[in-house]
Amino acid sequence: MPQMIFVNLPVKDVAKSTAFYEAIGCTKDPRFSNEVASAMQLSDEIVFMILSEDFFKTFTPKPIADAHATTEVLICLSRDSREAVDAIVDAAAAAGGEADVGPKQDMGFMYGRTFADPDGHIFEPMFMDMEAAMAAHPEGPAHEPA
């Protein structure tokens, strides 16, 4: 069984957030969804758990970050093409999110953009052409001397 990741995100309005995540390509899993939570499946391995702020608070003693004011996490999502990067950002904007909250990145072999969901959580969809990346950097990632 492949390892999965469940990203728990506090939201102000579960129904509104559920509609947003459906618009960017997620599927709601009704087995793990109710009025305070929606399990939004992006792939076989990635699920966003959309939790009302009150329900989210039951899992942590720490205050919930206001993602509009502070960054608690950046969620990078690989896409199959540059067009797929643009498509998910466009879908996010059309569904009530904000497109390009960070600068576009185009390094030739890698292309990325950003969007924020209605609660301010930042996503970074990106496409990497692995053949072009290996040709540009055959020695692997650059390392700073210790």
Image (cartoon, rainbow, N blue to C red):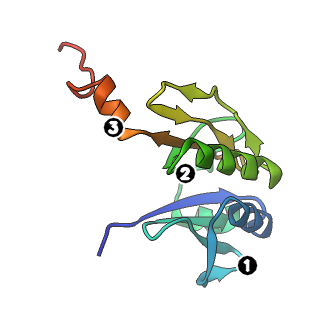
- At x 53%, y 57%, the residue is 61
Tell me what residue is drawn at x 61 percent, y 36 percent.
Answer: 113
Residue type, label 2:
Lys
Considering only vertical position in the picture, is 32 above or below 123?
below
Count residues near mark 3 (Cα–Cα under 10 Å), then give few for <14, some for 14-19, many for 20+.
few
125 left or right of 68 in image? left
Find out whether the residues at labels 1 and 3 contact each other: C-beta distance under 8 Å.
Answer: no
For residue 131, the mark is 3
Residue 136 lies, with reference to residue 31, above or below; the image says above
Q: Residue furthest left?
A: 146
Q: Quadrant of residue 26?
A: bottom right
Secondary-structure class at tag 1: loop
Under circle 3, the secondary element is helix
Q: Secondary structure under badge 2? A: loop
Using the rendered image of the protein, determine whether residue 73 is visible from the camera's viewpoint.
no
Residue 90 x/y as whole percent:
74, 47
Q: Quadrant of residue 10?
A: bottom right
Judge whether residue 72 can be spotted in this image: yes
Residue 101 is tagged as: none
Please identify, in this view, whether the residue under mark 2 or under mark 3 is nearer the observer: 3
Q: Nearer the viewer, residue 92 or 66?
A: 92
Query: Which residue carries the number 2 mark?
Result: 62
Residue 35 circle label = 1
Mark 2–mark 3 distance (CA, rounded to whole Å): 44 Å
Where residue 47 appears, as percent x and y from the top left, is 52, 66
Q: Residue at x 70, y 67 (%)?
A: 22
x and y, in percent, of residue 99 in the image: 73, 39
Q: Which is nearer the N-term, disc 1 or disc 3? A: 1
